[in-house]
Image (cartoon, grey):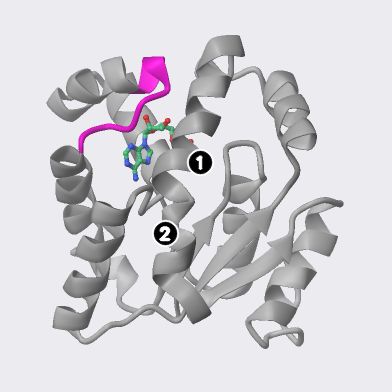
Amino acid sequence: MRLLMMGPQGAGKGTQAELLSEALSLTHISTGDIFRANVGHKTELGVRAQAYMSRGDLVPDELTKAMVTDRLGQSDVTTGWLLDGFPRNLAQAEWLESSLQEAGTPLTAVLLLDVPDDVLLERMLTRGRADDQGDIIHRRLEIYRTETVPMIDYFGKMVIHVDGVGNLQDVAHRVLRGIGHSDVHLSR
Ligand code: AMP
């Protein structure tokens, strides 16, 4: 199974991606986590990405695509994966689809967590990450609307809308139902 997890910052993408990838035995790939690890280790990629991340902007596609190519080339992805935070714009989406077609490993579904703005803002403010501060939060939401939302039309019927309000397990069960796997048990 090859899944994309979509949703605005604060929708619970990362937490759901972790829970679901474990339950479905998929490799969880978070581009945000990979970027943060690179920033932490001060790699060349991290140094280049940091300026964009600290403003709440997207890291340029060329850097991001190279990183994803590298990650999807590793051996732990052959049995299935859940991509969290990628793609984030139409150019990335088109690139991913054509790379996957070429490799003969098309997407299974795109999961979209729907959460109203007031809930998002509150969650981000309580999470308090460096890129979760006032202006940057607004910048990230604006980028989500202008750059990421157009992907919903692009992926069309592949998109499964899931109500993202509620506790972790309830939301995860909704996702599992959405992909026809209500029989799968959550490990926590
Ligand atoms: P996230 O944890 O997914 O919100 O990602 C944190 C930050 O990493 C984002 O605000 C971007 O600066 C960068 N980032 C993560 N994924 C992508 C992507 N697919 N394209 C460009 N930048 C990204």
> What whole-number distance in Å separates the C-alpha atoms at marks 1 and 2?
10 Å
Q: Amino acid at mark 2?
A: Met
Residue highlighted by disc 2? 151
What's the residue type where badge 1 is placed? Arg
Name the residue: 24% across, 54% down. Answer: 91
10 Å crowding of disc 1: few (<14), some (14-19), many (20+): few
Going from the N terminus, do you reach mark 1 or mark 2 first? Answer: 1
Residue 145: assigned label? 1
**Residue 46: x, y in percent?**
24, 25
Horizontally, is 169 left or right of 59 in the view? right
| Picture quadrant of ligand 1 | top left
In the displayed structure, 41 sits above or below 31; it is above
Q: Decide if residue 146 is in sight here.
A: yes
The residue located at (61%, 11%) in the rendering is 134
Q: Is residue 185 above or below residue 34?
A: below
Counting labels gives: 2
Left or right of 61? Residue 16 is right
Residue ID at (43%, 55%): 150
Q: Quadrant of residue 31?
A: top left
Q: Quick one: SS at disc 1? A: helix
Q: Residue 30, percent across and down?
A: 42, 48
User: 108 or 153, which is in the foreground?
Assistant: 153
- Magenta portion: prevailing SS class: loop
Q: Which residues are magenta?
A: 53-60
User: Viewer-proximal residue, 187 or 118?
Assistant: 118
Rendering coords of residue 96 (x, y %): 25, 65
**Residue drawn at point x = 58 percent, y = 43 percent:** 8
Q: Nearer the viewer, residue 153 or 2?
A: 153
